[in-house]
Amino acid sequence: MMQEARGKRQETRGKGQEAGSTHHGSRITLSQINLRGGLALIRRTWLSWVQHRSFFFLLAFGWMVPPLIYLFVWSTAAGGGTVGGFSRGQFVAYYLILIVVNQLTYSQTNWTVGDVIRYGGMNSLLLRPLSPVFDALSSEVAGKVVYMLFIVPVTAVLALWLRPELHVTLQNGLAFVPALALAWALRFFWGYWLALLAFWATRADALLALQDALIFLLAGQVAPTALLPGILHQAATWLPFRYMVGFPVEVLTGQLDAAGILTGFAFQLGWLAVTLALFSVMWRTGVKRYSAVGG
Amino acid sequence: MDYLKLIKRFIVIAFQDVLAYRMNFWISLLYSVLNLGTGVLGIVVLFSQVETLRGWTLASTLALLGVYLTLGALRGLFIGPSLEALAGMDGEVWTGQFDFTLLRPVDVQFLASFRHWRPLALLDLLLALGVLGTGMAQMGQTLTPGRVLAFVVGMAAGLLILYAILLAFSALVFWSPGFLFTWLFNALLQMARYPVGLYPGWLRLVLTWIVPVGVMTTIPAQALSGDLPTGMLAGAVALALAFFAGATALFRTGLRRYASASS
């Protein structure tokens, strides 16, 4: 699965590199190069991804199924009454929003960064007059657009059919936007620093699988975190994973009071600061160590 | 039996191959444990909120998960790797390597289904049987020979259905190389982690008759707990045989379309 994605990305990267080098030749100031080159790269990557959309639709469908399973199972559990304070309609609303949020914050780049390092593809990225983060960001933007083309219509149809129960207050709606943005940033950089371990260990991607498992358990997929029993609930509160997916969903569906929302933001910002620090340390020491293989 | 001798040879080769990559053993173990852990905890979380759900308890749902994991492990042991080498990405049909398979003096479907083995899947199998055993012990049901027999027959039917569906999808590669419908099927297969009875009515029908992934796990699990309605087992066996015949026919038809490939 990832091999195919990698192929697509390498293709993209080759072409993007040409665009980068022409900019380099035309002597513009550094900041202009970054912005123009970056935007060109983002546009290019996006166009390439849209061409391969059926492949990405299939991936998006695969990611959508686990939350859908829990949507159905919890709906059945609630039946006509409630389970843990949730009615059937509330479970439906929670999981439909979770499907969208999960897709918006999921960062496929994390899997490819490690490969780029292992296969020596980092060379061309480092030689570009752009920070390699632009490369990751361009796939992020491209990916989000393509996946949303699939996820939004499907979720809308499911919503019409399964009758979710959702009352969004102005306060919750407003708090949702920064919560979602922070969730994306946290998940992106957390995955990125884990992927950078590939500078030291060849099979660091195994840790990404561990991360996905923890997100599945603690970020609100298997159940809204409020329903997790004992120690799992404690872990969900203190570890960063809930703040990557579940927290924005809980905000929008009105599960949290004002204090809960503020505490959540505090955790999100705290973990984001830790993650950014880890990321910059890993990046600086890793690039110094980096030596390409192959050609 | 030549076929059995061949299978033995294939397995020995796979073991020799796997011993060369020792680090992969630990990584595989990690993946197996993660797969098991998320599955079990998912069920534990659900049943921490409700006692029973449409007649299913923590114990019987665990047993069902054990069935699901066992089928997954058997698939990973040989069906998956063999068919993947045939029709997967950069598979033999795609590269034209399939010519050499066709030239061998053995049944093509046999070779395509049994050639490649992945011994590390035995880890999954052990863990899966552990879950199954735990679930059964928790159920506290006495195992009569009748139930064990029904369970074994149900498992065989489930495995045959799984194989038939995968074979059929692999056969489609002869019509359209680069076909990724196995992925679509993998996504649907995950639904078999839970009893079909927990899904809404229309989905239950789809998972029983159209893409019978629900049959694969629910019937063996019900056989163990003695909840299996009479006739269902016979129905499952008939369904499995029908799927197997259909998939084999499709594979043979596809085979005739194969016209090699060149680079």
Image (spheres, coloured by chain):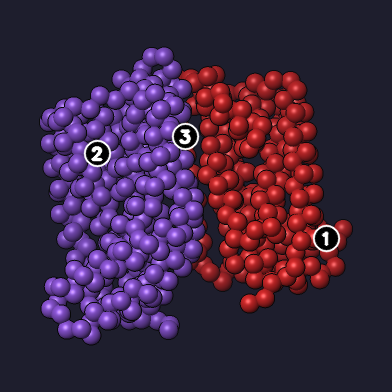
Chain colours: A purple, B red
B107 versus A175 height, above or below: below
Image spot of residue B157 (x, y percent): 72, 38
Report the amino acid beneath label 3: Ile
In which quadrant is the C terminus of chain B drawn? bottom right
Q: Nearer the viewer, mark 2 or mark 1?
A: 2
A149 sits to left or right of B200: left
Report the amino acid beneath label 1: Asp
- Mark 3 lies on a secondary structure that is helix
Image spot of residue A123 (x, y percent): 33, 79
Residue sitting at x 39%, y 34%: A156
Report which residue position mark 3 lands on: A69
- Mark 2 lies on a secondary structure that is helix
Residue sitting at x 39%, y 23%: A163
Report which residue position mark 2 lands on: A248
Q: Nearer the viewer, residue B257 or A172?
A: B257
Residue sitting at x 37%, y 62%: A47
Q: Nearer the viewer, residue B65 or A261?
A: A261
Q: Nearer the viewer, residue A20 or B106?
A: A20
